[in-house]
Image (cartoon, rainbow, N blue to C red):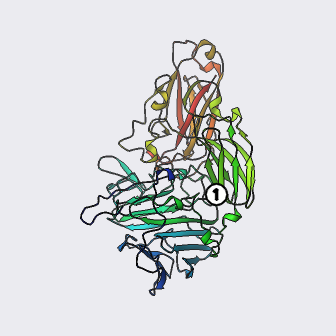
Amino acid sequence: MSGSANRPVRRRAFVLGTAAAVGTAALSGTASAAAFGWSDDGSNYVVDTGANLVFKVSKTNGDLTSLVYRGTEYQGYGGMNSHIESGLGTSTVSIRQSGSTILISVVYGTLRHYYAARSGENNIYLWTDKADASVSATRYILRVKKGLFLNDEPDSYTYAPTTIEASDVFAKSDGQTRSKHYSRLRVMDYDYIGWTTGSVGLWMVRSNHEKASGGPFYRSLLRHQSADGGGLYEILYYGQNQTEAQRFGLQGPYVIALTDGGAPSSALFPGTLTTSWADSLGIAGYVGASGRGRVAGVGISGRNTAYPYTVGLANSAAQYWGSARSSDGWFSIGGVLPGTYTLTVHKGELAVHTTSVTVTAGGTTTLNTIAVPSSNDPGNATAIWRIGDWNGTPSGFKNADLMTYAHPSDVRAASWTGNVVIGNNETASFPCYLWKDVNSGILVYFRLTAAQAAAAHTLRIGVTTAYANGRPQVTVNDAWTSAIPSPPAQPNTRSLTNGSYRGNNHTFTYSVPASAWRTDTSQYNVLRIDVVSGSGATGYLSAGTAIDAIDLLA
């Protein structure tokens, strides 16, 4: 896929996700006359892969100081190198060659970081072992020189000069918003991130995230580009909108891959990458394939087949997940470290069943059909009316799709205000987010039959996250007002404005007495939903919440 010297190549930018999108890109680059090996230039260890890639690692602090592919330097912008977090201090850096592998080891306190090169490959394999919280190591950032790739996607801010929130959300002159947070993608949605010009591709292939936190639905910054250059990230732990405690241990490998413009090889992807060549390298915390196990389930019964199901495994040390087959719920999750895990079945992103499973090294734990009790799925309850679907996401609500890659103030967003009438496109009319300072007090109009109005009913409001303890208080017909509910446990960072609705799913339940309903069946009942909190700032940073579903039970 190389560009012709006589034909200009139009620069393009892609966020390329799963293995299904990948063709037959080769694992190894085209070999050149250069010899595989390493040298010492005094300040750096210089590694030549024997293909088309030469890179340098600082002997002082373990920074990646140079990344030359086919003679072009890609590394660096703003005078900064590529490195863990914002760079380590003085470290112990060593190098050794074992046959067709070169390994550079970086030791900084309790942190261990590794770069590995394989003969004939245009890839750099990276591992990071964080043993404790004494070192801040939440990401690896590959910094890329400006002008080499074009990116005006949502996760850029090259053409967005106006800052509208903090120092990382921007607005273009046309009112569209940009931020490094606006990747659109959950962890389970992508295998790699990067750019291509059509003749050169530069990619970050993610690790299996077994020591990360947040599960398969977590969203985080993956890529950005500004006037200074671009960045590709492997997020090892990111505190923003985080639902789990930090896990410690070896992360990786994640891979910096260069290609002739195509996608990275699917052989590098988490779940397919094999690294038996690394078994004897002495990488701290490394566990090879023989020290891992598998969990397989013959099926899941009690599913609503209109939704995808995901099975997750998690304990304090590791996390894994896999998709359940749509036909019968069969699943298989491999490469699992030994231990006892909580197995969670998710309908969409809503947990509907949990159990415990134990994994042993070299073994497969086979589970009989998992039966999801009907009562575990709130969508199975009979409702007089329902807004949205109980799937753990705000999908289908007004502006829901846009909010994974734009700020709520974006010109493309429909009005956040406006009332809702049951029976008149109610889900698409109801905003996915409610804020105390923006659209609190939204009204929902609905009619009841005489029999329904004569009885008390349960009202449920499901949320996926909340900001600044925002939670719903309801009033019916100005005749009855609920108590202010206690705030559920939620992340304490921004969420609704930086592309993520993912928090802790929670259902608020309100027992509405029969005396609150209108007895004239020709009249609408009016439900008012207010966001209450003693916290938050103003506008879109006031207390708020994201909606999963709302229903009135029969």
Where on the picture, by quarter, is residue 245? Answer: bottom right
Q: Nearer the viewer, residue 51 or 479?
A: 51
Q: Kindly tell me whether residue 159 is visible in this rendering.
A: yes
Q: How many marks?
A: 1
Q: Single out the residue that lies furthest toward the left.
A: 6
Q: Is residue 380 above or below residue 300?
A: above
- The residue at which mark 1 appears reads as 245
Q: Position of residue 143 (x, y in %)?
A: 42, 67
Q: Is residue 372 above or below residue 365?
A: above
Q: Position of residue 222 (x, y in %)?
A: 47, 58
Where on the picture, by quarter, is residue 207? Answer: bottom right
Task: Tell me the residue at 60%/48% (across/down).
Answer: 490
What type is the residue that disc 1 sits on?
Ala
Task: Tell me the residue at 61%/42% (across/down).
Answer: 325
Q: Position of residue 85 (x, y in %)?
A: 51, 68
Q: Kindly tell me whether residue 538 is visible in this rendering.
A: no
